[in-house]
Image (cartoon, rainbow, N blue to C red):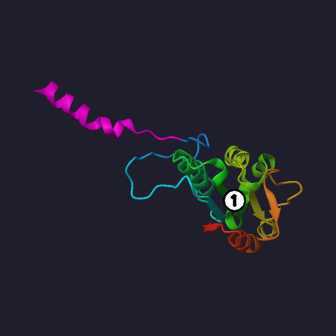
Amino acid sequence: MIRFVFFLLVIISLPIQAQSWKTPAIEGYGRIIEYEEVAIKPNPQKEYKMFFHITNKKERDGVNASLWKIARLINLLEANHVPKESIQVAAVISGEASPIVLTEKAYKLKKGKSNPNLDLIKKLTDYGVPINICGQAAAERGINPETEMNPLIKLTLSALIDIPTYQMQGYTIIR
């Protein structure tokens, strides 16, 4: 009887164990679970244009939660066969999230620890995601764009300009 119950438990748990977390496009970040039967799935025939306004310093899995969310979005789209050329994602960083743009040296000086976002920023920009820093936010937080900013990040005049500019280009704004 005990063997039968054990066998039954193993059989029942197989569908749950069959699924595993994946990071198909942005390795190590934005993990996803795939499902066959869901109400809405990405359409591989459509273009996806999303613009993220990153303002929060909240973390997920040790990195900025909004950067992590960008990785998850890309992973979800790619896992559902949306071609890379149909995925257009961009971001501007401002507010309390601004320090994530710092170089390793500058981050250590200002925060007393390593910048945990550098690897993810590299993977996102390598994928083709332009990441900007609001120049006004950088000035407010004492970030010198010439000496303290990660070279993968681009300085823009203001998030207040970036947001409507991307919106006029057909991007959906995500906060």
Mark 1 = which residue?
Answer: 90
**Residue 23 in the image: above or below residue 107:** above
> Residue 156 in the image: x percent, y percent?
81, 65
Residue 130 highlighted magenta (yes or no): no
Image point 14% across, 27% down: which residue?
A: 4
Where residue 163 appears, as percent x and y from the top left, is 70, 71
Q: Residue furthest front?
A: 45
Rate crowding at label 1 as few (under 14), some (14 to 19) or many (20 or more) other CA atoms within 10 Å. Answer: many
Quarter of the image with the N terminus is top left
Taking the image as shown, residue 1 lies to the left or right of residue 168, namely: left
Q: Where is residue 173 in the image (x, y as percent from the top left)?
A: 62, 68
Q: Name the residue at the top extreme.
A: 3
Position of the C terminus by quadrant: bottom right
Does dot 1 land on a helix, a strand or a loop?
strand
Range drawn in magenta: 1-22
Q: Which residue sits furthest right?
A: 146
- Residue 12 is a magenta residue: yes
Residue 75, image x and y in percent?
Answer: 56, 47
